[in-house]
Structure formats: C-alpha cells, structure tokens
Image (cartoon, rainbow, N blue to C red):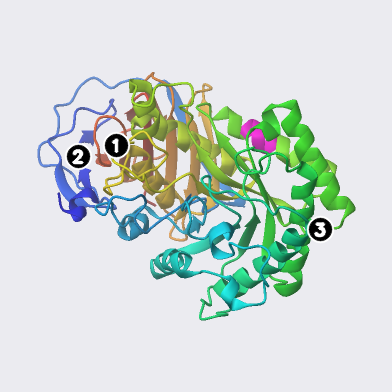
C-alpha cells in the first residue's frame, strides 16, 4: 500500500440537533486536518435528549496551553526492515514539534559517538558521528527541534567505568554539543534548547551494578557545570527518573539524595525529568504534584518539570492480548493518554516527549509507537493531532461541569476568538453533554474512537452531544 494512503483521515459527517449523535454516513478518504461540512441528508428529528453533564466554558485564565507535542525517536525509519516508513510527513501532520534523541539503539548514543572513553576528547578522531549525523539531519530537515539526551539507549548503556573515564566523558559531552549546536567538526548549527544528562539512572538497565547512585550524581554535576560554562543559554537537566521516583520508597530516596547532592554541590538544574507508564490518568496528577513538592521543599522553585517518556502500560498483559492492543492501538489508550496530557497541562509540566513515535517492526504492533512501522497512524497518533489543534488555541479558558464527571476537559481560545474544547472519556460508559451558551454558534466536532481508524469529523448544529466510552473529542466553537 502506498505510504500516502496511511496519512489520509476519514471524515464522517453527521448532523446533531439537540440529541445524541447519530450514526455517520459511510466515510470518504481525504487528507487531514479535517474540515467538516453539513451533509445533504440530515437524520430525521427526534425527541430532544437530556444531557448527563452541562459543560460551561468561562473566561481567559491568563495561563497558556503548553505545546506538549514531543516524541522519542524518528522521523527516520526505525528498525531493520527496509520497508519501514519515514515519518517526517506524518509527524508534521499531527503536530510533532520536538524529538528526544533516545533509543535509536546506536545513533546519538555516547557509547557510539565517543566509544573509547580513554581517548582524548579534544581529538576529532576519537568520535564517530556518521550514524548520529544521519538521524540528526532527518530531525532538523523535518523542521523539528532536537531534545538532546546525552547518554545511551536501552541496548548499549555503558556508564563511565572510573573517574578518568568520567572526566573524559564530561569533556566529550561538551564536544558533542559543540558538534550539533555550533557546527564543530563539520557538524550542525542547530539552536536546540535542552540537554538531558543520561536516562533512568535509577534503572539497572541503564546504570548497572556495580555502579552506584553517587557515581551518577557526580557525572550529572560535572557535566551540567561544564555544559553551562560552555553554553550559558543551554537548559540542562535530568535524570529521566523511572516511576519508582514517586511510587516506591527506594525511588523517593534516590530522588531526594540526587536533589540534595545537586544543591550541596551547586550544580545547575534547569529542569527535572521523569517518566511514567500507567493506565490511570490520575497518576500523572500524583506524580507531578509529588515532584513539584520535592523540588519546592529543597528550594528548587524555579526548576521546571519535563516528562520525557510516557505511555500506557502492558507489562502484566500478553503482548497481543485484546487489552494490550486496546491500550497501545485503540481508543482506550488514546482516551487514557489524552486524559494524561490534560493532567500534565493542569499540573505544571513544561515539556513532554511521548515514548515513542515509531514502532521498529510490524510484528510488534503493541509496541510503544504512535505509528506502526509501516507509517500507519494508531489511534493515539490521531488523538495527538487533536492535542495539536487545541495548542493552536493557546489562551487557556476556565471549564467546569455539573454534575461532577469522569470526563477530562481542557479549553482554549485563539486570537480570533475561536474556542476549542478537548474532552477525553477514558471510561467505558458513554456520556451525553451540553456546552452551555453556544446554541447559536457554529460548532464542529472531531472524534477519535474505535468506531474508525481515522479521525471522524461531525458538524454540530445542536446542543446535546454524546461522547462514547474510550473516546476523544475536540469541539471547535466559532465566535
């Protein structure tokens, strides 16, 4: 199948008149983002339905909806199959703006770029940038900002073996940034903002024994100081904590010890990065509040939070079980993750990079990617495109619901006065809702659910709308 076919979005058109949405006509293929039109054949009038929930959109809050639209990996094809898709166009279409350089499984790993930690870090012959430059070129050619993770991938993590190697690693880290930010050694002049030092050093896969937590603290502090001295405008942070950082006593201790070490040694820390894989959107709330409280308690009030890996969890499930596929390819995962995205907006997360953009193999369709290896979007990619459309309405508005509801909601407005409302229903129960005060205004509705493998667009001409279980909707309201 031709790659361009995978990027089409099916627009299903239906009219809603003070009643739950009716079944849409047979969809047709058209490129996205969707533009809805009124169908020629409207459904017959029925008795008005009563809403379960009334949603009220209020005034501008003064806050800005953050462009939490980053991913890990890509857009160059992942995996070994030569038929795997380049995702440049797909990323552009759904609104990706930031790509974290982690888990390319070789390229952009320090273990590949600077493989022999005993060699002189000032000698260009000590480096191999060939594979890494190709990945970097694909990122910048696509118009995406790199988020540089200085460390190694899952398959080849190798911390410095001793103080001498650590000192060389720190100097090499500065040279790598010069290569990608200042064009050193026939490199790039890319004005990227962020450098994250290592990945999950509280995970034995990335920081194996006999290496200790203290060795990471030393590596972080020495690297952060060296980078800030060389590039004062660079934002430096880490460590990309696993979720044990807020869920387990040993993880909380690791975090506390790290922050105390950073404070005592006056090391730069512009952001704290953490990871979360969960099927409960409320855990993003709990995690963000915990990390914020820990930072504030130690005087790091100005330190922002980055969530540099996040997704649903299928660890306790069979790889191709129905539940795994629902969480990684279906409407259930899209709704949970949209609720998590709203939770991060509500709780002070400044940057996010979803894990991950691409699958490496069509035999692992339940992998972490929002796109299959052949380039076809999963429903989470479709939901991602709705997040991007909400970000285009960045002036945050108050939004409330009566009675209380399990729906997750976020509303914004653009300079033209157009309002957008993002709604996620991560439960299995449909909900009928009414948006108060918009009866005379033109509304359009975009939907992601298991009802279609593409975004559905519906023209809303009434007041009561039904959002199905495990469904995401974006309501756009004209002036």
Q: Residue at x 49, y 34 (%)?
A: 339
Residue 276, horizontal then vertical, whole percent: 57, 36
- Find the distance from the CA under tag 2 to the CA under tag 3: 54 Å
* Nearer-the-camera pick, 133 or 300: 133
The residue under label 1 is 363
Q: Magenta-highlighted stretch: main secondary structure?
A: helix
Dot 2 or dot 3, earlier in sequence: 2
- Tag 3: Cα neighbours inside 10 Å, few (<14), some, or many (≥20)? many
- Find the distance from the CA under tag 1 to the CA under tag 2: 30 Å
- Find the distance from the CA under tag 3 to the CA under tag 1: 44 Å
Left or right of 424 on screen, residue 379: left
- Element at label 1: loop
Residue 267, numbered circle? 3
Contact? badges 1 and 2 (CB < 8 Å): no
Residue with the most extreme left position: 41
Q: Residue at x 55, y 79 (%)?
A: 183
Residue 435 in sight from this viewpoint: no
From what the image shows, is residue 63 above or below residue 25? below
From what the image shows, is residue 204 above or below residue 64? above
Report the magenta residues as a range. 285-289
**Looking at the rendering, which quadrant does residue 192 occupy?**
bottom right
The residue under label 2 is 12
- Tag 2: Cα neighbours inside 10 Å, few (<14), some, or many (≥20)? many
């Amino acid at each position: 199948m031709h790659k361009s076919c995978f990027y089409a979005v099916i627009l299903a058109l239906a009219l809603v008149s003070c009643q739950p949405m009716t079944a849409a006509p047979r969809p047709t293929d058209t490129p996205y983002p969707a533009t809805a039109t009124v169908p020629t054949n409207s459904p017959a009038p029925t008795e008005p339905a009563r809403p379960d929930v009334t949603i009220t959109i209020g005034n501008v809050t003064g806050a800005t909806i953050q462009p939490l639209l980053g991913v890990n990996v890509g857009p160059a094809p992942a995996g070994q199959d030569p038929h795997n898709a380049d995702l440049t166009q797909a990323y552009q279409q759904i609104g990706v703006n930031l790509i974290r350089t982690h888990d390319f499984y070789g390229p952009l790993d320090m273990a590949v770029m600077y493989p022999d930690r005993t060699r002189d870090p000032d000698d260009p012959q000590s480096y191999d940038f060939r594979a890494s430059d190709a990945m970097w070129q694909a990122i910048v050619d696509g118009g995406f900002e790199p988020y540089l993770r200085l460390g190694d991938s899952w398959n080849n993590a190798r911390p410095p073996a001793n103080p001498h190697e650590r000192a060389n690693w720190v100097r090499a880290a500065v040279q790598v940034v010069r290569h990608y930010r200042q064009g050193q050694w026939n490199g790039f002049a890319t004005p990227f903002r962020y450098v994250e030092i290592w990945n999950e050093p509280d995970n034995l896969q990335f920081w194996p024994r006999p290496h200790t937590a203290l060795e990471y603290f030393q590596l972080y502090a020495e690297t952060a100081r060296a980078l800030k001295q060389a590039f004062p405008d660079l934002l430096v942070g880490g460590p990309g904590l696993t979720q044990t950082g807020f869920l387990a006593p040993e993880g909380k201790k690791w975090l506390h010890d790290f922050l105390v070490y950073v404070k005592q040694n006056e090391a730069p820390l512009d952001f704290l990065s953490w990871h979360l894989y969960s099927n409960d959107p409320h855990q993003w709330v709990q995690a963000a509040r915990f990390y914020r409280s820990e930072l504030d308690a130690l005087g790091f009030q100005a330190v922002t939070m980055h969530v540099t890996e996040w997704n649903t969890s299928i660890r306790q499930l069979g790889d191709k079980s129905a539940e795994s596929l629902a969480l990684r390819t279906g409407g259930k995962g899209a709704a949970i993750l949209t609720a998590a995205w709203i939770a991060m907006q509500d709780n002070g997360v400044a940057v996010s990079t979803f894990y991950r953009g691409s699958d490496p193999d069509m035999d692992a369709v339940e992998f972490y990617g929002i796109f299959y290896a052949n380039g076809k979007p999963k429903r989470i990619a479709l939901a991602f495109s709705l997040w991007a459309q909400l970000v285009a309405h960045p002036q945050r508005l108050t939004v409330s619901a009566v009675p209380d509801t399990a729906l997750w909601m976020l509303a914004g407005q653009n300079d033209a006065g157009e309002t957008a409302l993002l709604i996620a229903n991560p439960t299995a129960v449909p909900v009928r809702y009414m948006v108060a005060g918009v009866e005379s205004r033109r509304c359009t509705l975009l939907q992601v659910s298991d009802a279609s493998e593409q975004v559905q667009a519906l023209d809303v001409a009434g007041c009561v709308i039904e959002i199905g279980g495990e469904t995401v909707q974006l309501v756009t309201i004209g002036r």
